Image (tube, rainbow, N blue to C red):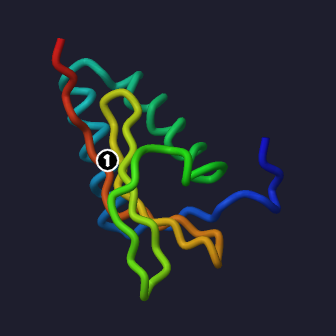
Amino acid sequence: MATNDERYEVANSLEVGRQFRAAVEAARIHGEFAIAVRASRWILDELTRSPASFGESRNFLVAAELHVRIGFAGPVYAVFGIHEPSRTVFVRKIGYSQRKL
């Protein structure tokens, strides 16, 4: 398990905060509130501990030194960038995807 010194800082904008609230509300409407909250907590834990192992790679922005990835947990997904030199994860988007049964 990563120690506090090894953890990544996770940053997001106010817009991402709004996206998160909308995703949780959509999950509530579809009867998936509890699983969406658990999935969101798990995503945050993965982003602080081992973001390069979470989800799949989408792009590498050379000039910004940013690895762009997308990761899913249950009905919740996050698009994020990892800046290794500063050990910072920037959440670009978070959303809810209704599961097909």
Residue type of the residue flagged with mark 1: Arg
Q: Which of 98 and 6 is in front in this view?
A: 6
- Residue 90 placed where, x, y %? 46, 67
- Residue 20 placed where, x, y %? 33, 49
Q: Left or right of 68: which side holds 4? A: right
Q: Say above or below: 34 vs 48.
A: above
Q: Left or right of 73: which side holds 52? A: right
- Residue 30 placed where, x, y %? 19, 22
Q: Nearer the viewer, residue 54 or 42?
A: 54
The residue drawn where x is 29% and y is 57% is 18
Q: Say above or below: 23 vs 35.
A: below
The residue lying furthest to the bottom in this view is 63
The residue drawn where x is 16% and y is 18% is 100
Q: Which of 28 and 44 is in front in this view?
A: 44
The residue drawn where x is 43% and y is 32% is 37
The residue drawn where x is 40% and y is 47% is 56
Name the image quarter holding the N terminus: top right
- Residue 64 placed where, x, y %? 44, 84
Name the image quarter holding the C terminus: top left
Q: Say above or below: 42 vs 50.
A: above
Badge 1 element: helix
The residue lying furthest to the top in this view is 101
Count of numbered circles on the image = 1
Disc 1 marks which residue?
21
Label 1 crowd bin: few (<14), some (14–19), many (20+), radius 10 Å? some
